[in-house]
Image (cartoon, rainbow, N blue to C red):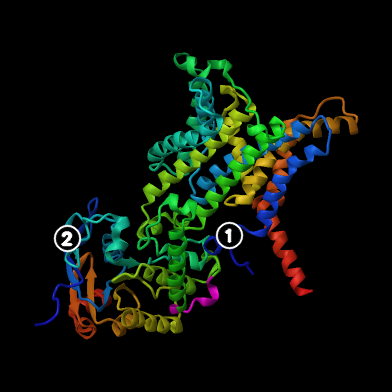
Amino acid sequence: MHKDATPLLSVRGVSVRFGGVVALDDVSFDVAQGQIAGLIGPNGAGKTTLFNCLSRLYQPSAGEILFEGASVLATPRHRIPNIGIGRTFQNVALFDRLTVLENVMVGRHSPTHSSFLANALRLPSVVAEQKAARERAMELIAFMELGAFTHWPAGGLPFPIRKRVELARGLAAEPKLLLLDEPAAGLNHEEVSTLETQIRRVRDTLGVTVLLVEHHMSLVMSVSDKVVTINFGKKIAEGTPDEVKRHPEVIRAYLGTGA
Amino acid sequence: MAAMAQSWATKAGIGKVAMFFWVLLAALPLAGFVTDSPSFDYYMFMGQSMLIYAIAVLGLNLLIGFNGQISLGHSAFFAVGAYTAAILMNFGGVPYWLTLPIAAGVCFGAGFLFGFPALKLEGHYLALATFTLAIAVPQLLKYKAIAGWTGGVGGLLLDKPDPPFGIPLSADQYLYYLCLVVAMVVFWGVFNLLRGRSGRAIMAIRDHGMAAGTMGIDTGLYKTVTFGISAGITGVAGALSAITIAYVAPDSFTLQLSISFLVGLVVGGIASLPGCVIGGAFIVVVQNSSQSISDWMKDTFSLRYDVPAWAIYGTLLLLLMFFLPNGIAGGLAVLRARLGRGSRQS
């Protein structure tokens, strides 16, 4: 009757404890295929912690994360891009001594398979794989309007450019879900509106579902189909941007009790 | 403004300059046919040593320069390679050329296994762990229980191979070519590795290990395999040294040898392939010429006492580090870029 009702990503009762500190407490939400979902919350609410569970940098103490119905927590960290999850980092984690092109090509690591020996011997299969990886990387560099920086070392580039390089690299493995950790942080007004267009293009042109953690409220509220709010590790609201904006818990979390 | 980077991913093949230098290196022994200098064979021997050091430095550079792991223990892998060749030739009757791939395999295995505990260590701690290899291996080689194989303190004497098929070359000319061919094969392999998927992963780990992991690179596997390849390459250099010197002894493989590799690596240029060849030459030339400079200073300035050769070596190193912080290869690259820009402007 209707198409596959399984959500692309399903976070179920996830809790994370660091010693006695509860960073996430029984958080659950779904992200449907093709959505742009926003994850918001005050500083220290646990947003990045949740991202780090998704990319297997942290192990939750309870709960389950399903991606296309299969357990993410049963997948080793270096297999995460293979199942279709890509990400960027809050503080931009590029390979500074490699060029922009090489950075994006590193993003092609997981869909390619040539071995050390095949590379050392430069077998014809390696040449073909390299050519394809390079072409795909060049397409993404063009997609992110980074053409002028293709052969520049990533380390010396201005911060907003570095953020776009990271986005291109995150898309290189052709993920189904892209996790963006504060993509607007450090950007000026104009750059934020470019970013908004780019996030929409990622979803509309490439068909990639997006989950973003963001403090920039106007960006989240305008780009997201759905917003999840967490505070002190607990989910306090979930719904459309309009619903979340009016939610009393959310207003309290951001503006205080007003008492 | 910063120049465009040297991008490994866009390397179509070996550059013209590199080709020119390999051809030049291949042409050097031909001088033997026109000169009757009695020191010619000695120069050929120095050439062999430079190539051997270049290979050893290449092994270390792959680890330090390209993968960001440190090792003070590569003298140990050099020793294992040398003894593998010596023991196989002496007791197994294995032809000398066949000992090279075997030494590579043995040292790859040793390096790969050592790479596992090394995964838990970084920076200074890894330096210390590898340091223990460098100080333990020479003593282990002297250990009485295995002296029957290693020759103990006295080491093993070998036969110097003669040129095959009656090729009209002197033994030292021939051995120079042997070293050169092995060096070319190893450099070609590493060059290919670096411009492919594996090399990008190796360098990504150096620049940002955690991000490399989230890109799908199995960082643990890559680091241990890189440690193994690095040790294997340095082991091949060790085997070549056993073959060309026709003698192995434990005291040739002390910590000082590791430090020599490190000096060659830094002086030549970190994460630079031409830098490895320059570094190999530097190790041989400067260690030999410090004494000559000392003698020259004593004569020229009518000094009463010798100037300590190691002090001259140290001064040279300091000057180089001061004027060429990116190594000789880095300095040459800057010079080349400047000349290139100058000619374009004119």
**Left of A39 or right of it: where is A152?**
right
Mark toward the viewer: 2 or 1:
1
Q: Residue at x 70, y 45 (%)?
A: B25
Q: Which residues are magenta?
A: A143-150
**Camera sees residue B57:** yes
Query: Which residue is label 2 attached to?
Result: A64
Q: Residue at x 52, y 40 (%)?
A: B233
Can marks 2 and 1 be said to lie on one chain?
no
- What is the x, y in percent for residue A83? 27, 63
Residue A188, by quadrant, is bottom left
Q: In the structure shown, which secondary structural element does the residue marked by tag 2 occupy?
A: strand
Q: Residue at x 51, y 23 (%)?
A: B93
- What is the x, y in percent for residue B92? 48, 22
**Cα–Cα gap, marks 2 and 1:** 49 Å
Characterize the local packing of mark 2: few (<14), some (14-19) or many (20 or more) Cα atoms within 10 angstroms.
Answer: some
The numbered mark 2 sits on a residue in which chain? A
Is B110 in the magenta? no
The numbered mark 1 sits on a residue in which chain? B
Query: Which residue is label 1 attached to?
Result: B13
